[in-house]
Amino acid sequence: MPDILYSSDPHPGFILLSDEFILQHMPRANGTYVKVFLYAYQHYCNRVSGLSTQSIAQALHLLESDVIEALHYWQDLGLVHMEDMNGALSIRFEDGGALPTPPPVRDKMKQQKEEEEQRPVVSKVVRVEHKPTYTPEELALYQTNPKIAGLFAKASTSLGAPLSPPNLSLLYSFYDYYRLPVDVIEYLIDYCLTHGGRTLRYMEKVALDWSDQGINSLEKAKAYVTRFASYRPILNALHIRAPRPSDQELEYICRWMDEYHMPEELIVEACTRAYNRTGQPSFAYADSILENWNLMQIHTMEGVEKADESFLRSQGVPMERRKTAAGSDASGFSVHKDWDYAALERRAQEQLYSERK
């Protein structure tokens, strides 16, 4: 909650706004941005002390992140100049929002199109520097919003117990800090419960991921979940409980699907074999298996079984032992118990890195 400093002389008892601000900027901005501008500008002109982004939020019944987002909006337009001063926020307003006189209107529709193209777009998630905690009094105030009250009630019902103030504070941060809409948070809770994540700490990891991915609607959330649902059997085969693959793990999966053209069934089989042989989620080992199958032009489970049978027969394994041995030292992929799996991972990672370059 940075304090706000001023770089102007006191202005007695009133503020001045230009016609250009009222006629040009105000109609384009949403109401929240205008409220923040006017409130901060009044304090700026009169040098009122004790102002902070948090105090603005409380006075205007807004989220602190909304206040910061509004200030960034006006800064992008050139009406506000902000500068960090050892943790405090120094603000200077530029002539009350005066705009250069616009050119004569030639064509109304053409002018509107040009204005849309020139208008700054605030699309990234703006967060305060540190995730805030909320007092019981603040949480009670926020629950006057029916959507927030409904969210808290749904979460308590879904988790099977009333939420403590610290848990309510954590849940509210999904909305205030991670900037997820209420309906997305409700969907997130159901999604996590379905996949075994029954704690709010686990749900926070998902909230952080969704926030970083720019998921700001229920439609985007459902599409995101559908996309990664196809990866869940692969992660399960490697005993990975994370909500999504890491960027490097995703590179492996994309290679298996797009370069090797392996069906999910074979990818899961290779990952299961890799985990059973190494005792750890080794993407590099699974990649070695799949690469070998691809070189042998094996793309079906029937082909894998035939390759297993052929390999075991070539090794002199008796018929009665071949069924139990298949899936371990088979498919023409010789497994060595003294292999350095960490070194294998490093070599595979270096290969991925060199391919990206």
Image: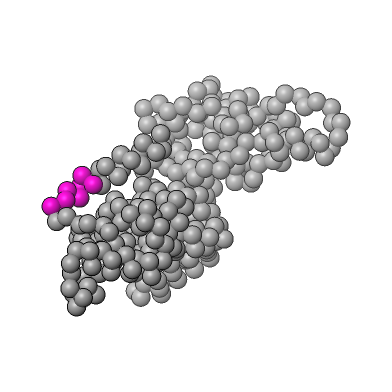
Q: Say above or below: 198 vs 36.
A: below
Depth check: 54 or 248 in front? 248
Residue 290 to residue 119: above or below: below
The percent position of residue 253, horizontal first and vertical second, equals: 40, 54
Decide whether residue 143 is among the magenta residues.
no
Residue 94 sits above or below residue 350 on the image: above
Residue 192 picture location, percent across and down: 39, 66
Residue drawn where x is 21% and y is 75% of the image: 319
| Residue 253 versus residue 326 in the image, above or below | above
- At x 42%, y 42%, the residue is 128
Residue 257 placement, left or right of 28: left
Identify which residue, 257 or 101, lies in the foreground.
257
Task: Kindly identify the residue that appears in the image at 52 percent across and 42 percent down.
Answer: 124
Q: Nearer the viewer, residue 330 or 232?
A: 330
Residue 149 visible: no
Identify the image quadrant of residue 173. bottom left
Q: Report which quarter residue 309 is drawn in.
A: bottom left
- Left/right of residue 351 with respect to residue 255 in the rendered view: left
Residue found at the very far bottom of the displayed protein: 320
Magenta range: 338-344
Residue 327 rendering spot, x and y as whole percentages? 26, 67
Q: Is residue 340 magenta?
A: yes
Colour scheme used in the picture? one colour
Query: What is the quadrant of the N terminus in the image?
Result: top left
Q: Position of residue 292 (x, y in %)?
A: 33, 54
Q: Can see residue 87? A: yes
